[in-house]
Image (cartoon, rainbow, N blue to C red):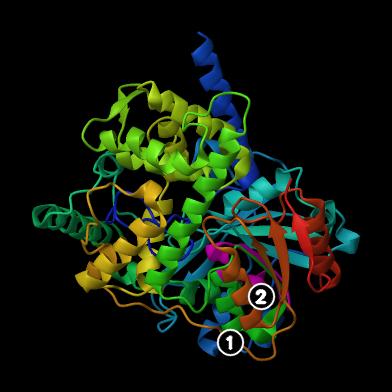
Amino acid sequence: MERRCGAAGEVGRWHAGAVTFPAPSRALRTTLVVLAALLTAALTTACTTTASGTGAAQGAAAGSDPALAKYYDQTLSWGPCAPFAESDADRKAFAAPDLDCARLQVPLDYAQPGGRTAEIAVLRHRATDQAARIGSLLVNPGGPGGSGISFAATLAGGAGTPRAILSRFDLVGFDPRGVGASTPAIDCLDDKQNDAERADDDTDPSSAGVARTEAENKAFVQGCVSKTGVDVLANVGTRDVVKDMDVLRAVLGDDKLTYAGFSYGTRIGSTYAEAFPQNVRALVLDGALDPEQTTIDRTVDQNEGFQDAFDAFARWCAAQPTPCPLGEDPAQATAAFQKLVRPLIDKPVPAGGGRVLGWNDAQTGVSQALYISAAYPILARGIAELALGSGSILLRLADLYYDRDASGHYSNMLEAFTAISCVDEQQITDRAQIDEQNRRVDEVAPFRSTGLGPVDALDPCAFWPVKPTSQPHVPHVSGLPPTVVVSVTGDPATPYEAGVDLAKALGGRLIKVDGNQHTASLQGNACVDGAVAAYLTDLTLPPDGLECRLS
């Protein structure tokens, strides 16, 4: 996920006492492919418009301001996706012949539609059965900061995406403003600075340690200001993303929006429903942010969710035929883990390629694997390797979380996460509140505790140059058609009850999913995907009380 904002937060850049995580930017099944490769490597080492894009009618139907007509009426110029690739993985995925890409023009500031513009990167996979085509299905993977075009390309090429969806919808992903291939892009640190931030654990709770951490956070903010600009930072929030999405809906030729959002993407969906209820056809919201929670409560609950996921891993590990590196008693697993990772604060271990694994990256690597129970084998292997004095597996897991490629280049996912969170959430400037939050986190997530006490340093949002453009709240929506919320009982990043609360707030239908992973839709589960596909294609709501189980 998911350090501010429910789906949210990055390790090491903000105070270490309370950490929240954004959802991985790629689909979970792509993550599993990477994890499988890591496991194989570790074992080897151990052994030795139809979518043409005219939107005039739709723009008028949206009731948009006449000053926005030129945006609603624009025509997209579709072409190859290769120029949009931001990583080696994208370059490979975007080469598929059934994908095309375009740039959508939107005002940077909707209050000044005649001023500076931004361009939103859009990727499309055309419906395979054009005769039965319903329209476009827009998707977002979460974050905030996740690339929607990478996500859509993964879904289009994945075996888990229901054929009924690919045949009847143009699958459309977009990089939200400031993210990925959209421009202007959020930029705060270069690659070397990102490496340095990860190596700085920010674990010193003394007044001098707090002062150093706050100075680093101020420097990070200044980097965002100088590299990105205050005018961009002021307009990257969800308030503006949903306006872009309505323009995109119209330009794609859809009278109504059909949308599937995951993790933070559920906030995009619920915010769109609040702003444009008359333009909604269908919403699937999977891995919800609780609309009623404060930023602090969400942070605490998410850390508790990761402790629950760690405990579930410990039980799995103890039940395996091979010895568990955390011992055979799951009740003692947290203490065993702390014994392994706390020394990394003072003495990182070698991790190959001239790099080392410190406390921050160890925690990040473990949490990356806790997003999905299918990653438990590689996590066990990484912890076992750490016990032998090597950190290569956990470091590579952390690289996956940070979106760092083999050449050492980072995407802007986590910089975007911070920038968007700082205008979407509360900007907490009271150290007493930070201290209370971090003490609560130490209590509910002891596997993440440094043992040194909470660090009550103010995070970057406290020094952000612009005020929030929205706040977490219960959506106030009238005239919204029925929606579907999917929530997993053992989701570490967006706890199950948050989905219950969001479904209630929207008057939607809930699909309960028993299992241990972050989100469940469009990943090959017949129960979940059958219900989701029926709803998206035919608007057939899932049975009341539907409960599915992950294998």
Question: Mark 1 touching mark 2, by CB under 8 A?
Answer: yes
Q: Is residue 549 above or below residue 73?
A: above
Q: Is residue 291 above or below residue 47?
A: below
Residue drawn 30% across the image and 48% down it? 12
Circle 2: is it few (<14), some (14-19), or many (20+) Cα within 10 Å?
Answer: many
Residue drawn 42% across the image and 46% down it? 411
Question: Is any atom of residue 404 visible in this view?
Answer: no
| Placement of the C terminus among the 4 image quadrants | top right
Q: Is residue 353 left or right of residue 170?
A: left
Tag 2: amino acid? Ala
Q: Nearer the viewer, residue 239 or 126?
A: 239
Q: Which mark is residue 250?
A: 2
Q: Nearer the viewer, residue 432 or 5?
A: 432
Tag 1: amino acid? Ser
Q: Is residue 472 above or below residue 412?
A: below
Task: Please give the range of residues in magenta.
Answer: 248-266
